[in-house]
Amino acid sequence: MKKIVLASASPRRRELLSQVGIEFEVKPADGEEKITSTEPSKIVEELSYQKAMFTARALEKENGHVPEGCIVIGADTIVSYEDRILGKPADRDKAIQMLSMLQGNTHQVYTGVTVLTGESGSWKVHTFFECTDVIFYPVSEEEIEAYVDSGDPMDKAGSYGIQGAWGAYVKGIRGDYNNVVGLPVARLIYETKKIGIDLRG
Ligand SMILES: Cc1cn([C@H]2C[C@H](O)[C@@H](COP(=O)(O)OP(=O)(O)OP(=O)(O)O)O2)c(=O)[nH]c1=O
């Protein structure tokens, strides 16, 4: 059986892969990511590639060579609003600022995914991104502060989790819900099928 490795510490990404019946190991990427792009779609693709590559290099080191048939998956999620890129908030104030900006408006969530496959001694690279529009109802300052004080936003791009208490303010989405949570799993299955891989079997 082929070995699939998720290069992520995100519990959401783990759940999404498990949910559709994919069996995998987890080996979070360990390294400093660098952004050189300015376009949201390029940023998430670039960061997903770097995460997948950190883990792939570590596997290569452990094995003494590129493990044949091994599949490494890395992903990165950001929020884009007008010309701003929003990652995880640095502190409480930043989280409040982000949510105050996003409430009552429509923003985009981008997730980039990189799949590396070990083939004939090197890593073949497959990268794509998915974008989902998310619309929030107007939310008061008090509601934002109460949500931020719950601690939920701190490990999430854009300072919210659509799957948690912030779901109370989501008017709607256009596109893939799972993409907002951190991994467009159906697209991942579709893209890997195109390169002859069924991740589920
Ligand atoms: C917008 C949004 C983001 N998120 C999460 C998904 C990602 O885990 C996180 C964005 O951070 P990322 O840097 O993409 O990922 P991560 O640090 O959590 O995990 P790793 O790099 O090890 O793979 O925000 C939600 O859970 N719900 C949401 O609604």
Image: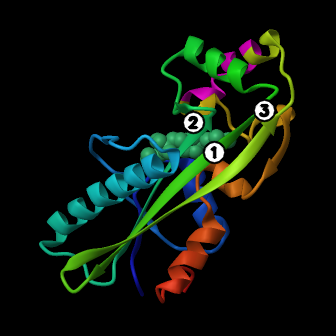
Pick the front one: 23 or 137: 137
Q: Quadrant of residue 130?
A: bottom right
Residue assigned mark 3: 165
Going by the numbered disc 1, the residue's amino acid type is: Val
Residue 142 x/y as whole percent: 80, 10
Q: Residue at x 55, y 57 (%)?
A: 14
x and y percentages locating residue 119 in the rendered image: 27, 84
SS at mark 3?
helix
User: Does label 2 or label 3 sit earlier along the sequence?
Assistant: 2
| In this rendering, the label closer to the viewer, 3 or 1 | 1
Q: Are marks 2 and 3 in contact (CB under 8 Å)?
A: no
Residue 162 is left or right of residue 71, and the answer is right
Kindly indicate whether the residue at mark 1 contacts the one at mark 3 (C-beta within 8 angstroms). Answer: no
Label 3: how many Cα within 10 Å (few below 14, some 14–19, many 20+) = few
Give me the disc on residue 157: 2
Q: How is the image coloured?
A: rainbow
Whether the residue under disc 2 has CB within 8 Å of ligand 1: yes
User: What is the span of residues highlighted in magenta in the rendered image?
Assistant: 145-154
